[in-house]
Image (tube, rainbow, N blue to C red):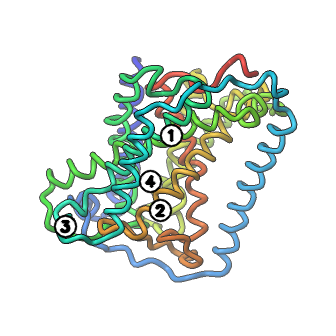
Amino acid sequence: MTPILQWTSCGVLLASLPLLGILVIGMAPWPYLEMPPTTRYVEHAGFSRFWFNLFALIDIIMLLGLLYAVRCGINRKPKPSLAQPRGARFPWWGWLGLSICLSVWFLAWNRFTWFRRFQPHTFFPIWMGFILFINALTAKRRGHCLLSRNPGRLGLLFPVSAGFWWIFEYFNRFVQNWWYHTGIEHLGPWQYFFLASLAFSTVLPAVLSMIDLLCTFPALNRGLSRCRPLSLPESKSVPALLFAIASTGLALIGIFPDQLFALLWVSPLVIIVSLQRLSGRPTLLQSLENGDWRPIVIPAFGALICGFFWEMWNSLSLAKWSYTLPYVSCCQLFEMPILGYGGYVPFGLECLVVGLPVVGPLFDEQAS
């Protein structure tokens, strides 16, 4: 089976599971396929101290694990003389990207009458400027970046990113944890699809560019490649069981949206990695057996950093999204409840799993 067919089959499987769940119990599928998504039909549970504490504990454990890994990387980073070489000059197109990002950010957060027509469409140029700037920083620190190594592959990542994020938009139809406002109800299906796809196309380029930048820091690159090895079970019964649990959970998110909403971020990763393990293909977890924690830790931090900017720029923009999370809707940082940022950790790993076959290796094998 070719890689394209493998990923297509995986996408079809992921998309079919939530729909299959609601069809089995006789629920109508049409509200979940609405375009654009304007109907809000899920009434979420209110704040629960028990669930808030449980999710807070999970987030704290993930954060402590990431910080422990960073400490390991700092302790094992190479001497300064062995650090990665720095680029000689900041590229001119990096200044262009920064100028675009800052100027469109200014326009997005203001309400100029002359800019009213373009006000809802600031997401894409802000993130294009951000992507250029992050690649320029990487080139400055290391001498090369995703854009300079293979601009064609980076360009291909944009349409892949659009399809990638549409999967999560589709999952959200079943749990309705976020919703868009400011005029999308006036858009036709194809117009909404085009404008939304344009915005979604920046997700993977942004996260993978940030991962590439973080790899220029010796503590995160060479340091994390020399951490403690972890033994993984050799039996395929473990990934088979995890695949069954994750698939069942994803099939039930439309039936129990309040109880299972977190699986929107966790189940796709577990399903993809389990399928890779069952088919004998390499997974991002295999590097842990050699003490290389980079494919786990760096994507998590990359997505968290991008997530901060996503939520910040969204907060005062005209075209924006808002969140309604069951049990934990309090203590917001911008529009997002603070515990919701925990979803960026598995999301970063999903970005790496999907983006790596497109852009090629991001982690230097010589570092380990």
Give above or below for 333 relative to 210: below
Residue, far right: 75
Q: Earlier in the sequence, mark 2 or mark 3?
A: 3
The residue that appears at 77% across and 50% down in the rendered structure is: 67
The residue that appears at 27% across and 72% down in the rendered structure is: 111
Q: Earlier in the sequence, mark 2 or mark 4?
A: 4
Place of residue 351 in the rendered image (x, y in percent of width and height, measured from the top left): 50, 40
* Res 40 label: none
Quarter placement of the C terminus: top right
Q: Rounded to the nearest whole Å, what is the CA distance between mark 1 and mark 2? A: 18 Å
Q: Earlier in the sequence, mark 1 or mark 2?
A: 1
Residue tagged by mark 4?
251
Quarter holding residue 239? top right
Residue tagged by mark 3?
116
Q: Earlier in the sequence, mark 4 or mark 3?
A: 3
Quarter placement of the N terminus: top left
